Image: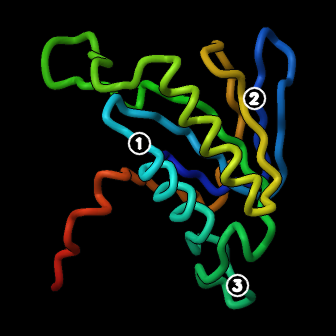
Amino acid sequence: MRALVQRVSRASVWVNSKENSSIKLGIVILLAIGKDDSVADVDYIVEKIANLRIFPNAAGKFDQSAIDIKAELLLVSQFTLYADTRRGRRPSFSNAAPAHFANELFQKAVNQFRNLNLITRTGIFQETMSVELVNEGPVTIWIDSKDKDMPRKSS
């Protein structure tokens, strides 16, 4: 499972020229489900994002999480994060999960965020959407659940 996380002051999703959902201070999460993902990947991604200290404290240091500040979340399904561009000019999405499976895990992620008492809004699964956001910082972080098993390099 892959997530592109962006700290925002506001964001919205539009479908067919109509606003579908919006948030204020919080996080936009572009979430991609891979064909080999499981509920364990959902658990990892949700825990990591909810507790990621990317909001500043009074001194301006990254020291607060979405849970700490009661941030709002906007989750958008984004299978294109599984694009494989190694060959040719047209990306392959063969590592993305089939739609029915991806939607099931996407909804599990939404429910887990909501169970943490975080206001969680979404786009519409499998729809063409326009996403507007104001990225604060800017802060943009890539999270891949497959990285959880990789050791950190020490310097």
Q: Secondary structure at mark 2?
A: strand
Estimate how packed mark 3 is, as few (under 14), some (14 to 19) or many (20 or more) residues with alpha carbons within 10 Å. few
Image-quadrant location for residue 84: top left
Name, please, the residue furthest toward the front. Answer: 39
Q: Can you give x and y, in whole percent of width and height, for residue 51 in the image? A: 59, 71
For this view, does 65 lie left or right of residue 30? right
74 over 91 or under it: above or below: below
Q: Earlier in the sequence, mark 3 or mark 1?
A: 1
Q: Quadrant of the C terminus?
A: bottom left
Q: Callout 3, which amino acid?
A: Asn
Residue drawn at 81 percent across, 61 percent down: 117
Estimate how packed mark 1 is, as few (under 14), some (14 to 19) or many (20 or more) residues with alpha carbons within 10 Å. some
Q: Callout 2, which amino acid?
A: Val
33 over 3 or under it: above or below: above
Q: Nearer the viewer, residue 67 or 115?
A: 115
Kindly report the distance in space between the C-alpha atoms of the residues bearing marks 2 and 1.
27 Å
Q: Quadrant of the N terminus?
A: top left
Q: Callout 1, which amino acid?
A: Ser
Q: Can you give x and y, in whole percent of width and height, for residue 125 in the image? A: 64, 21
Looking at the image, is mark 3 or mark 1 nearer the viewer? Answer: 1
Estimate how packed mark 2 is, as few (under 14), some (14 to 19) or many (20 or more) residues with alpha carbons within 10 Å. many
**Label 1, on which residue?**
38
Q: Earlier in the sequence, mark 2 or mark 3?
A: 2
Q: Earlier in the sequence, mark 2 or mark 1?
A: 2
Kindly report the distance in space between the C-alpha atoms of the residues bearing marks 3 and 1.
34 Å
Q: Secondary structure at mark 1?
A: loop
Q: Nearer the viewer, residue 60 or 63?
A: 63
89 over 139 or under it: above or below: above
**Label 3, on which residue?**
57
Q: Nearer the viewer, residue 108 or 22?
A: 108
Residue 13: assigned label: 2
